[in-house]
Amino acid sequence: MFTLFSKGGPLMWVIFLCSVVAGAIIVERLFHFQRAKLHLPNFNTRIKKLLLDNRVLEAEKFSENSAGPVAHIFAIGIHIHRRVLEQKERILACAGSREIRKLEKNLRTLGIIARISPLLGLLGTVTGMIKAFVKIQELGGSVDAAVLAGGIWEALLTTAAGLSVAIPAMVAYHYFEGKIDDFSAQMKEAVQTLSEWLAISSAVKNES
């Protein structure tokens, strides 16, 4: 295997480095998203009941002890519920942006690797083909077909390696993007739930 790897030329090492970085990012992000996972129906049922029963401190504690960006938004929203509307909107917007940035960590690097790996492979193939044809010219055109075929398949190794890195990296990148969209939608629903609770809470206070 190493002999085959070395025949691809120096760019194979660059592609290999890209594969290591991409693999590390994918594993780290999978672990992070798993930790951020929240059983939303149960959480929403529990938090809504606590808020409607006006058990605010208990609801805040429950949110703080729950994992994931949705729970964090609830914890912050409940903690600042006595502030004026403009402040609450600004704080929740900043908190939401912060949670999204946490979810997007290293994804730009993964996307770059997915895009440049095929180009690195193509570059290796082109340089390999140039070397093969330079050799043919040096031999005055009298070269065995087997030798020529050997030079070509060695040059094509980098393209195969680049695609082997790019395809799973691209799939993982779009998978994580989809998960971020899901979390973003859940956080918007959390803010809506908090807004409804605040409206009900304000109405009850006004009546009393």
Image (spheres, rainbow, N blue to C red):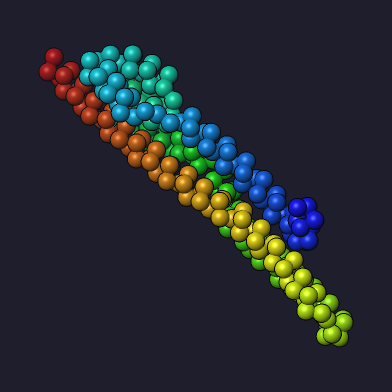
Give the answer, above or below, for where 128 lies relative to 205. Answer: below
Give the answer, above or below, for where 32 lies relative to 164. Answer: above
Instruction: Examine the image and state in which quarter residue 78 appears.
Output: top left
Query: Is residue 94 in view from this perspective?
Result: no
Residue at x 57% of width, y 36% of height: 28
Location of the C terminus (image quadrant): top left
Residue at x 39% of width, y 38% of height: 183
Disc tally is 0
Residue at x 58% of width, y 38% of height: 27
**Residue 166 percent location from the top left of the image:** 59, 55
The answer to whether residue 203 is left or right of residue 99 is: left
Query: Is residue 17 in view from this perspective?
Result: yes
Which residue is nearer to you in this view: 157 or 27? 157
Q: Residue furthest right?
A: 139
The answer to whether residue 160 is left or right of residue 90 is: right
The answer to whether residue 100 is left or right of residue 42 is: right
Residue at x 52% of width, y 37% of height: 30
**Residue 140 percent location from the top left of the image:** 86, 86
Give the answer, above or below, for where 142 lies relative to 26. Answer: below
**Residue 165 percent location from the top left of the image:** 62, 53
**Residue 11 percent location from the top left of the image:** 74, 59
Which residue is nearer to you in this view: 109 or 124? 124
Instruction: Examine the image and state in which quarter residue 191 appears.
Output: top left
Give the answer, above or below, for where 61 lies relative to 173. Answer: above
Instruction: Examine the image and state in which quarter residue 26 appears.
Output: top right
